[in-house]
Amino acid sequence: MALSRPAPRRHIHTRKITCEGFQRDDGLWDIEATITDRKTYSFENIDRGGIAAGEPIHHMIVRITIDDSMEIIAAEAETVGSPFGICVGGAPAVAGLKGLKIGPGWRKAVHGVLGRTKSCTHIRDMVMGPLAQAAYQTIIPMRNRENASKPPTRKPAVLGTCVAYDPASHIVKRMWPQYYTGVEE
């Protein structure tokens, strides 16, 4: 279903978050996320003197290296652009993610490492959501391809996580009939 036609308006702000997943030659995975915020107008900024229209007010990059179990082997971040010079001080805390595992309790664990004044809110939000989601989107389909000919040995983790994977949906009936809970026709 398409969005409704918007009311007359003018563009003010663009936030872009890009995530990419890479399979490394050593068997590990790199997941990278970049965030940029840009305004359509120029404005004054105490630390930078001024920020021109289209120039990033925020530009941060995060890379995590993870293994097949989603454990973080290494993590780093860079603040390329920020409204205040002090903001670069939020990037080094990302290294503290090493040893954490993406999965249940992820957001709480990230908050413990990067919460409040320990890091940058934009870096933290990227790590909590888009970066972790990109890790799943990178690794799980590759695992599934490798195991496509094997019957599942346990209940798929995605069951019950969205409308498509509702145990009563026709998708689950087709993919994992043994876990289908809908009404038989």
Image: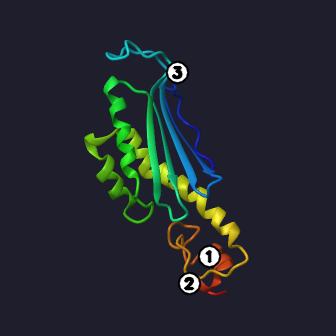
**In front of the other: 120 or 11:** 120
Image position, residue 30 (x, y; %)? 56, 49
Query: Which residue is at the front of the view, 74 or 106?
Result: 74
Q: Position of residue 136 (x, y in %)?
A: 55, 59
Mark pair 1, 2: CA separation: 9 Å
Is 87 left or right of 138, judged from the image as shown?
A: left
Q: How is the image coloured?
A: rainbow
Mark closest to the chain's N terminus, 3 or 2: 3
Location of residue 12 with respect to 146 vertically, above or below: above
Residue 183 visible (yes or no): no
CA neighbours of label 2 inside 10 A, class few (<14), some (14 to 19), many (20+): some
- Residue placed most toward the observer, 120 or 10: 120
Q: At which x and y percent is residue 22?
A: 62, 50
According to the picture, the residue beneath numbered tag 2 turns out to be 181
Q: How far apart are marks 3 and 1 (CA)?
A: 45 Å
Q: How far apart are marks 3 and 2 (CA)?
A: 51 Å
- Three-letter residue code for mark 1: Val
**Residue with the mark numbered 1:** 172
Ranked by sequence position, the earlier of labels 3 and 1 is 3
The quadrant where residue 120 appears: top left
Circle 1 — which element?
Answer: helix
- Find residue 76 and report its horizontal and vertical position in percent: 45, 42
| Badge 1 vs badge 2, beta-carbon distance below 8 Å | yes
Q: Is residue 22 above or below residue 165?
A: above
Decide: marks 3, 1 in contact (CB < 8 A)? Answer: no
Q: Residue at x 57, y 78 (%)?
A: 168
107 lies left or right of 16: left
Circle 3 sits on which residue? Answer: 54
Q: What residue type is labelled 2?
A: Thr
